[in-house]
């Protein structure tokens, strides 16, 4: 049998407004675009997907289970503009079949630069989740599933029991992502790895008509999961929640697929559905997973080059983090919050040049015409932030 | 496949991108084995270092006609040792003098005979002009060499007579040539193309490198517009240098969209071995370059407006305006009126190695064109490792992704981007690195292959 573990990532950044070197005000964010996108995604994805999940939980009498990681930035947006979505997540929390995961509140890459600030941002998210949904998160995932041994060690020391990352070929070797693992020297910590082939069949390929497997039916997909039986305990389907209705539009049949899938999975074999912590309780570690270098779930490289792959990105990330001491010492809560919102990984993703030529995934709500525009805008805003600390 | 090609510029005598394009395209055609007879007016001095093989008198059928001549005398001395001989392109000159734009030399000045001649006098210009800059009362006479253009016309006098003469001579020449298709570049040669097509029954292809709307804005010369329109309608195929230009052909000239193709220009590898690159006047100074004819359509005014905004934030900068044209005096005055005279250097028209030298000096190239059918210069800048800001109103922006793009009128954005490039090395570095790779992928050979396909289709009745 296989236990299917769904984890959905829910995130939107605070996109920046066009800010030239001649601007002097301190309003850096494009409220109008952010509100429009938030509301659009709420209607196209969050609400209908939440409803589908809720219906499935009822249909399977509590035996359908999923996990979510919802960033602090999207929660702020929903609280401000679409509180109905927050309510609908609360209803999911009330079923007891949904687990919420901790991450950095700002969906940042701060782990690479500043450990104390990483811990602060994670604790801030942890508090938010426990207040909203009445759960103390036991599982951690780092932004974009960026991961190495050090991340596991730091979050173990913070009290988390499980961490998620990508089942990248180069770390797995001959091993399967359908087992649980543990990091070196952290025997009590658990790692769950994304089964990227099956996950991406849904997230990226579902509506691709040039894909030989198109159209993907729930029955066919369930048969692929069952094929893994006997070779592993779990099938980790990790993806952006926006897959449902936003990356794959409703007219591709993605919601019908979602609603039909659990039934087909049950039918296809002796399978069930677990939250991440349930999977950890049920299954032992199959061995040590050593990941000395940073990996992620992005692109074919599965590394951090989508955010730190060119000198503009390195420069921007370095500069925002170089201010941390002065910003945090300023005691100016608004400034600190803005500085943290500027750390969302999306801002650096927009500066990615390696993917600029063939775009595709990277174009999702990218407000810029080119990575250069993204960098210029970002650096102008950093100038303004810097000027504010200098004036204090 | 043999092509009877009608043009009016050939390197080094270039006032716009047309000569560069014809040179590149014929070179590419030569590589794929297409034979070309290229007809240019005699006023055009011939590149001494090109792939064009000059026909010897013995093989010329029209020797007895003084109006049509081959420039055989230059052949021996100019064939550089080891230069690959190119066998498929014949250059023929007919005695018509075409000046579609005011040339930056006074009339009567001897034509430039070789690359070695001109650059010397011009090479000093950047430096000397830079030094004489603070005066700004006007440029040195030897550089301020554009005839006053009181009529406001963009074209040399009596041009229509020359166009007719060129057509008549081309027709005579065609009578003694065998070819499959006729390929005419821009309006000057359209009448000739039509005449040759009518006389020989061969299919005509017209190639639109720019339209009257690109050169003159809304104040079009009706006669030229008519020549363009008639030529495009008479042609079996219309080739445009960009979708921007294709759109103009369709909307302004009512050409059947089904027969309009786009073939983009390219750029040859840069000559990165120029010597005598002048040292910056001040070592800490960044150089922002404008290179092109100074006409309304090239947008020098927007460049100066942006410059004014840049210097309000960043003083270690020099704006070099390289080019002649009917607006040069106005631009000098404008810079003075804006109070940025000490930040701006006018070099006058540059050619040959001087262009490479000025690129070598530049930290950034800006093309603020109001309307630019293609725009080869940004590709040249990138191939010289200079990052570029280009106007969105340009054909080249359709194929360049690793460039900064602005609306020509948005001088705030232009200044914002100029400042960003000057202030942030990582931006400059990334633009250079990716731009180089992108431009290396463009080749005249690929453009020529597309032309070759069009020739085949047209020759087989398509």
Image (spheres, coloured by chain):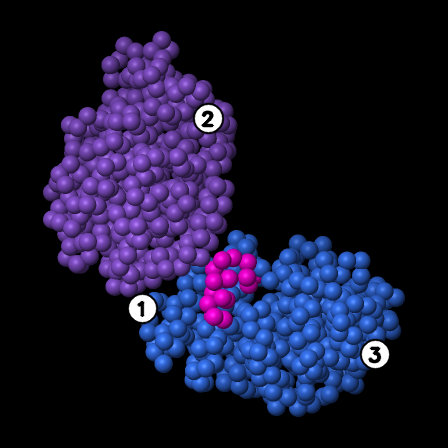
Chain colours: A blue, B purple
Q: Residues within 10 Å of mark 2 (few under 14, many from 20)?
A: many
Q: What is the quadrant of residue A126 in the picture?
A: bottom right
Residue on which the image places disc 1: A22
Report helix, strand or loop for mark 1.
loop
Task: Kindly identify which numbered label has been placed on residue A282.
Answer: 3
Quadrant containing the N terminus of chain A in the rendered view:
bottom right
**Is residue B113 something that shows in the picture?**
yes
Q: Secondary structure at mark 2?
A: helix
Q: Is residue A205 left or right of residue A79?
A: right
Circles 3 and 2, Cβ within 8 Å, touching? The answer is no
In this rendering, the answer to whether A92 lies above or below B453 is below
Cα–Cα gap, marks 1 and 3: 59 Å
Dominant secondary structure (helix, strand or loop) of the stretch shown in magenta: helix
Tag 3: Cα neighbours inside 10 Å, few (<14), some, or many (≥20)? few
Residue A80: where, in percent of width, then height?
50, 85
Precedes in sequence: disc 1 or disc 3 = 1
The answer to whether dots 3 and 2 both sit on one chain is no
Quadrant assignment, res B111: top left
The spot of residue A16 in percent (x, y) is 44, 71
Q: Nearer the viewer, mark 3 or mark 2?
A: 3
Residue B437 in picture, x, y percent from top left: 49, 45
Residue linked to disc 2: B30
Relative vertical location of residue B104 with respect to residue A55 in this rendering, above or below: above
The answer to whether residue B258 shows anywhere in this view is: no
Q: Relative to B135, is A136 on the left or the right? A: right
| C-alpha gap between disc 1 and disc 2 | 52 Å
In this view, the residue in front, A180 or A274, is A180
């Amino acid at each position: 049998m296989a236990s299917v573990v769904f984890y959905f990532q829910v995130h939107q950044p605070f996109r920046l407004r066009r800010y030239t070197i001649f601007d002097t005000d301190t309003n850096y964010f494009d409220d109008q675009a952010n509100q429009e996108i938030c509301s659009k995604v709420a209607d196209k994805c969050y609400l209908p997907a939440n409803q589908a999940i809720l219906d499935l939980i009822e249909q399977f009498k509590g035996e359908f289970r999923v996990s979510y990681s919802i960033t602090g930035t999207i929660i702020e947006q929903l609280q401000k503009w679409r509180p109905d979505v927050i309510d609908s997540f609360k209803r999911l929390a009330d079923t007891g079949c949904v687990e919420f995961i901790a991450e950095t509140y700002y969906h940042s890459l701060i782990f690479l630069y500043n450990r104390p600030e990483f811990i602060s941002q994670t604790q801030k998210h942890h508090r938010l989740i426990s207040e909203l949904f009445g759960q103390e998160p036991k599982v951690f995932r780092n932004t974009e599933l960026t991961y190495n041994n050090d991340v596991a060690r730091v979050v173990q020391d913070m009290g988390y029991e499980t961490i998620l990352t990508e089942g990248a070929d180069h770390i797995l070797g001959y091993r399967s992502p359908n087992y649980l693992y543990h990091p070196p020297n952290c025997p009590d910590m658990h790692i769950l790895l994304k089964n990227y082939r099956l996950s991406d069949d849904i997230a990226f390929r579902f509506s691709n008509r040039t894909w030989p497997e198109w159209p993907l039916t729930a029955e066919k997909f369930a048969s692929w999961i069952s094929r893994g039986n006997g070779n592993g305990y779990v099938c980790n389907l990790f993806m952006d929640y926006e897959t449902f209705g936003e990356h794959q539009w409703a007219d591709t049949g993605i919601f019908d697929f979602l609603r039909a899938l659990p039934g087909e999975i049950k039918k296809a074999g002796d399978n069930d559905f677990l939250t991440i912590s349930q999977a950890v309780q049920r299954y032992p570690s199959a061995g040590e997973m050593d990941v000395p270098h940073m990996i992620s779930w992005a692109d074919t490289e599965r590394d951090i080059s989508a955010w730190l792959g060119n000198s503009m990105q390195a420069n921007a990330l370095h500069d925002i983090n170089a201010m941390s001491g002065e910003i945090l010492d300023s005691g100016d809560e608004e400034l600190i919050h803005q500085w943290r919102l500027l750390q969302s990984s999306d801002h650096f993703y927009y500066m990615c040049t390696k993917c600029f030529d063939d775009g595709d995934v990277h174009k999702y709500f990218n407000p810029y015409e080119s990575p250069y525009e993204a960098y210029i805008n970002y650096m102008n805003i950093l100038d303004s932030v810097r000027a504010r600390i200098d004036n204090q | 496949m043999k092509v009877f090609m009608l043009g009016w510029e050939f390197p080094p005598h270039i006032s716009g991108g047309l000569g560069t394009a014809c040179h590149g395209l014929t070179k590419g055609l030569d590589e794929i084995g297409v034979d070309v007879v290229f007809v240019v007016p005699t006023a055009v001095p011939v590149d001494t270092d090109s792939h064009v093989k000059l026909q010897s008198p013995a093989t010329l059928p029209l020797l007895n006609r003084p109006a049509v001549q081959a420039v055989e005398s230059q052949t021996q001395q100019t064939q550089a040792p080891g230069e690959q001989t190119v066998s498929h392109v014949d250059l023929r000159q007919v005695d018509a003098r075409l000046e579609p734009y005011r040339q930056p030399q006074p009339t009567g000045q001897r034509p430039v005979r070789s690359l070695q001649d001109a650059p010397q006098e011009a090479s000093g210009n950047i430096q000397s002009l830079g030094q004489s800059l603070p005066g700004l009362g006007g440029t040195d006479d030897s550089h301020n060499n554009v005839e006053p253009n009181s009529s406001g016309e963009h074209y040399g006098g009596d041009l229509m007579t020359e166009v007719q003469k060129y057509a008549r001579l081309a027709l005579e020449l065609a009578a003694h040539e065998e070819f499959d298709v006729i390929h005419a570049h821009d309006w000057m040669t359209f009448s000739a193309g039509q005449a040759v097509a009518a006389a020989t029954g061969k299919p005509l292809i017209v190639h639109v490198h720019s339209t009257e709307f690109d050169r003159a804005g809304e104040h079009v010369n009706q006669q030229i517009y008519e020549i363009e329109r008639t030529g495009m309608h008479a042609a079996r195929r219309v080739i445009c240098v960009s979708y921007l230009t294709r759109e103009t052909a369709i909307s302004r000239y009512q050409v059947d969209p089904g027969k309009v193709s786009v073939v983009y220009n390219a750029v040859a590898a840069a000559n990165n071995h120029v010597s005598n690159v002048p040292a910056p006047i001040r070592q800490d100074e960044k150089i922002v370059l404008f290179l092109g004819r100074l006409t309304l359509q090239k947008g020098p005014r927007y460049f100066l407006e942006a410059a004014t905004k840049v210097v309000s934030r960043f003083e270690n900068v020099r704006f070099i305006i390289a080019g002649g044209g009917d607006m040069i005096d106005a631009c000098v005055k404008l810079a003075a009126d804006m109070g940025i005279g000490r930040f701006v250097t006018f070099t006058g028209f540059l050619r040959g190695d001087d262009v490479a030298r000025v690129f070598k000096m530049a930290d950034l190239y800006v093309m603020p064109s109001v309307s630019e059918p293609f725009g080869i210069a940004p590709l040249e800048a990138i191939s010289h490792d200079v990052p570029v800001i280009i106007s969105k109103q340009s054909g080249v922006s359709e194929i360049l992704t690793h460039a900064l793009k602005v609306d020509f009128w948005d001088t705030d954005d232009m200044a914002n981007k100029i400042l960003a490039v000057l202030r942030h090395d990582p931006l400059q570095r990334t633009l250079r690195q990716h731009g180089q790779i992108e431009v290396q992928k463009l080749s005249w050979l690929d453009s020529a292959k597309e032309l070759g396909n069009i020739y085949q289709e047209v020759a087989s009745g398509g």
